[in-house]
Amino acid sequence: MAYETILVETRGKVGAITLNRPKALNALNAQLMTELNQALDAFDSDATIGCILITGSDRAFAAGADIKEMEEKTYPATYLEDFFVTGDRIAARRKPMVAAVAGFALGGGCELAMMCDIIIAADTAKFGQPEIKLGVMPGIGGTQRLTRAVGKAKAMDLCLTGRMMGAEEAERSGLVARVVPADKLLEEAFAAAEAIASMSLPILMMTKESVNRAFETSLSEGVRFERRVFHAMFATADQKEGMSAFVAKRPPDFKNA
Ligand code: CAA
């Protein structure tokens, strides 16, 4: 499919999406959100893809929702179109997703990164929810996912002051999984995505679902959910393959079965 706001490539079992509106610092307009979901649909339905990587440019992962597109919107219009419900579709993807973030990840850009399962940040990355300065607040999950990621104190600080935090603070706060030198970002992010994609896809998806369950339920229910899914894994050929490969001291050959 021909896209205008994103670039799409496949590297082995990794499907990569590069946000590509350089003149607007990859601001998330309606077209970009639609194309992003179309590309995610395509990777979701491609059985050879085991992990999805989302990245931007050196200067910006994404500087937020497109302010110029939003400026004149009215309440009835935002309500009727359920403005940014498209974000829910991104967040609900079942395959693992890695965000490789350099430069600005602000507003909707930070929210998009948080919809991914792992954020790998360049040391140049700057995260923030500056919507308050525009007279609004985060609207694609920022008040919820940021709070779950970094806790109330830091989430309130970022959402109420609109300040940015650098990569090191983001890692210290638990938002970011790893910080790497900017010139190594894509190498490291692809290596992580390839390592993930080499695992059994159904087991990856069940693991993702189980970790995410931690945000939706009590500890005892979450642990019970985990145990039941763990039991179900013994019905897969990949569990037999993974364990017999370990015992035979050879690499596993997962069949996604
Ligand atoms: N929407 C639309 N255009 C944007 C944009 C955005 N979020 N962010 C940057 N741009 C555009 C600028 O308007 C500018 O375009 P022009 O050249 O046509 O003027 C271009 O990108 C380059 O930006 P700057 O000249 O401002 O670059 P800078 O280096 O001086 O500043 C920046 C960079 C600090 C990121 C600054 O651009 C900025 O503050 N951007 C807005 C960040 C923001 O408020 N994000 C939240 C958006 S609201 C949101 O996301 C709501 C939600 O949760 C759903």
Image: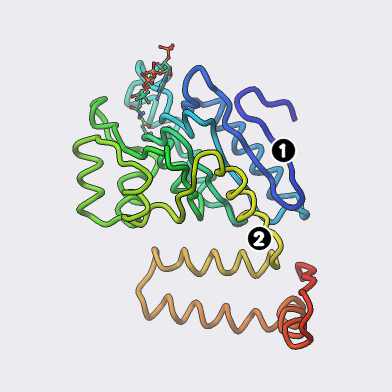
Q: Quadrant of the N terminus?
A: top right
- Compared with 96, 161 (above or below) is above
> For this view, does 70 lie left or right of residue 122?
left
> For this view, does 176 lie left or right of residue 44?
left
Mark number displayed over residue 195: 2
Task: Identify the residue at image location x=24%, y=50%.
Answer: 154
Counting from the top left corner in percent of width and height, residue 57 is at 54, 30
| Cα separation between marks 1 and 2 | 17 Å
Classify residue 142 by image quadrant: top left
Counting from the top left corner in percent of width and height, residue 218 is at 35, 73
Mark 2: C-beta under 8 Å from nearest atom of ligand 1: no
- Front residue of 108/175: it is 175
Task: Identify the residue at image location x=29%, y=37%.
Answer: 164
Q: Amino acid at mark 2?
A: Ala
What element does badge 2 sit on? helix
Mark 1: C-beta under 8 Å from nearest atom of ligand 1: no
Mark number displayed over residue 9: 1
Viewer-nearest of discs 1 and 2: 2
What element does badge 1 sit on? strand
Task: Identify the residue at image location x=68%, y=50%.
Answer: 44
- Compared with 31, 151 (above or below) is below
> For this view, does 56 lie left or right of residue 217?
right
- Front residue of 217/251: it is 251
Counting from the top left corner in percent of width and height, residue 123 is at 43, 42
- Compared with 217, 3 (above or below) is above
Q: Amino acid at mark 1?
A: Glu
